[in-house]
Amino acid sequence: MPDDVTRPTVIVLGAGMSGLLAAAALADHADVTLIERDALPAGPEPRRRLPQARHAHLVWTGGVTALDTLLPGLVEELVARGARLAHIMGDMVSRAPNEIWFRRFTSTPHRNLVCSRDLLDAVTRERVLADPRITLRQNTTAVGIGGDAARVTGIHVRVRDAEEHRPADLVIDATGRGSRASTWLRGLGLPAVPEREVDAGVAYATRVYRAPADDFPLVNVQANPAVPPGQGGIILPVENGRWIVTLSGTRGGEPTGDPDAFTDFALGLGDPVIGELIRDAEPLTEVVTTRSTANRRRYFEKLRHWPDGFTVIGDAVAGYNPVYGHGITVAAQSAVAVREHAATTGLTRPGSARRLQKAVTRPVAAAWDLAIGQDIFYPGASDQPPTRVERALAAFVDRAVATGARNPRALAALLDVMSLSRPATRLFSTDMLLPMLFGPGRAFLDSAPLSDEERKSAF
């Protein structure tokens, strides 16, 4: 940009993952201010008002690619500080929702980033805030947007007991599930934003253990919507020799915060392997629980009129049941869309914000369909029962999972979609359809595919 051209000013609300990545995406194109209502921790420590950070997290391949696109070298730095690029399925022992164990194929290219959420946030925060073009304002609360239905001109904030208006060419709301964007837009005279919620009533309980074995695979027992209540769990080996163990259950089968009940719940899953692995492991923490897990989507892109100067991203657009692990991946892919939009379209042209809102929403659709395609089948999940199309797609995905469990080419196609690397149409490729139609020939596994060495090291 020539020296005589004034850079646009952008205010990003929220310094969580979505906000940090959006700020990084815009730093080449604008002067960015991050507005954060809390004081951020100095290192890999828990954040206030982020209870989900205590549970198991991972970043799928599509998110790993997006992170390295936005912040080259970030993934390498995370690995140097204890994170792991786990081969899916080589470094994972996984039981599908239809109660089929996946074989541990190593021929697929997918690597998931695995670490604690505290480490992921801290390293990302350090990288983003080291950029002199990005300014952080902590202990500052957004209380409203300025402007009218045609254009947002800035943000009203509260600092201590004083309120002030901060002008901006673009305001990006990355405040998460609790976003007030819909209310703010109605206050400008715009209609209500269409919403949909699918709530399987999932509760999560997590406890951290000392890992009894080094370099152990992820162990995942997924819940089965066809047999409610759906109960599942995951062992996530993370940095500093720890296992994050997260258990989940839907209405009528929720885990509790009682430490004496934790192992018994794990032993009572569809397969007892997680309970067997933690039975003699040393707990390092008490049990923490979370219940705010509904899939909730706000269709901002469907509004006929959209004000210039305003965009909503991340969980403020769509939040997912955390069991699917797609939130951070979608946030990173949406931030890539922000960067591409800024480079090709610009940030201040009339109609630019409307096009940007549609662009950041595109990565949402695949994750949303994958999440509700399972959760909508739980009793009470939605006041709209599954449609015939949703039932047909769910049946097809079940067949795709069964095929992928026994065939490496079909598994690669399945993981391309699950990792948000390729669109859902990949499931209709010959890699999937041929083995689905003619059969992979290999029998299903009848137990968790842990090696003798792995079992010996952990039991």
Image (cartoon, grey):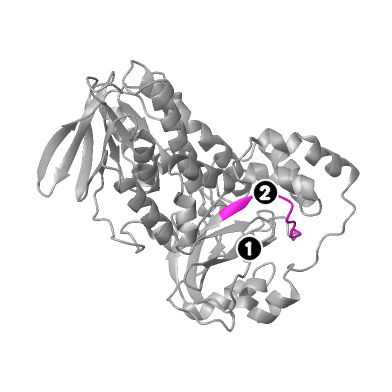
Q: Main secondary structure of the magenta part?
A: loop
Q: Is residue 231 above or below residue 358?
A: below
Indicate the amino acid at tag 1. Asn
Q: Position of residue 192 (x, y in %)?
A: 37, 29
Q: Which residues are magenta?
A: 102-112
Q: Position of residue 317 (x, y in %)?
A: 43, 37
In the structure shown, which secondary structural element does the residue marked by tag 1 occupy?
A: strand
**What residue do we see at 31% from left, 20% from top?**
348
Q: Is residue 109 magenta?
A: yes
Disc 2 residue crowd, few under 14, some 14–19, many 20+, Cα 10 Å: few
Q: Position of residue 115 (x, y in %)?
A: 49, 61
Q: Is residue 33 magenta?
A: no
Q: Which residue is situated farthest in the left direction here?
A: 162
Q: Is residue 37 above or below residue 48?
A: above
**What residue do we see at 34% from left, 24% from top?**
347
In the structure shown, which secondary structural element does the residue marked by tag 2 occupy?
A: loop
| Residue 52 visible here | yes
Q: Looking at the figure, which quarter contains the N terminus?
A: top left
Real-space CA distance between mark 1 and mark 2, rounded to the nearest whole angstrom: 20 Å
Left or right: where does residue 396 sit relative to residue 298?
A: right
Task: Look at mark 1 in the image and give the residue it sits on.
Answer: 220
Q: Quadrant of residue 373?
A: top right
Task: Look at mark 2 in the image and give the residue it sits on.
Answer: 109
The reply to whether callout 1 and callout 2 are in contact (CB within 8 Å) is: no
Disc 1 residue crowd, few under 14, some 14–19, many 20+, Cα 10 Å: many
Left or right: where does residue 133 sit relative to residue 212?
A: left
The disc label shown at residue 430, or none: none
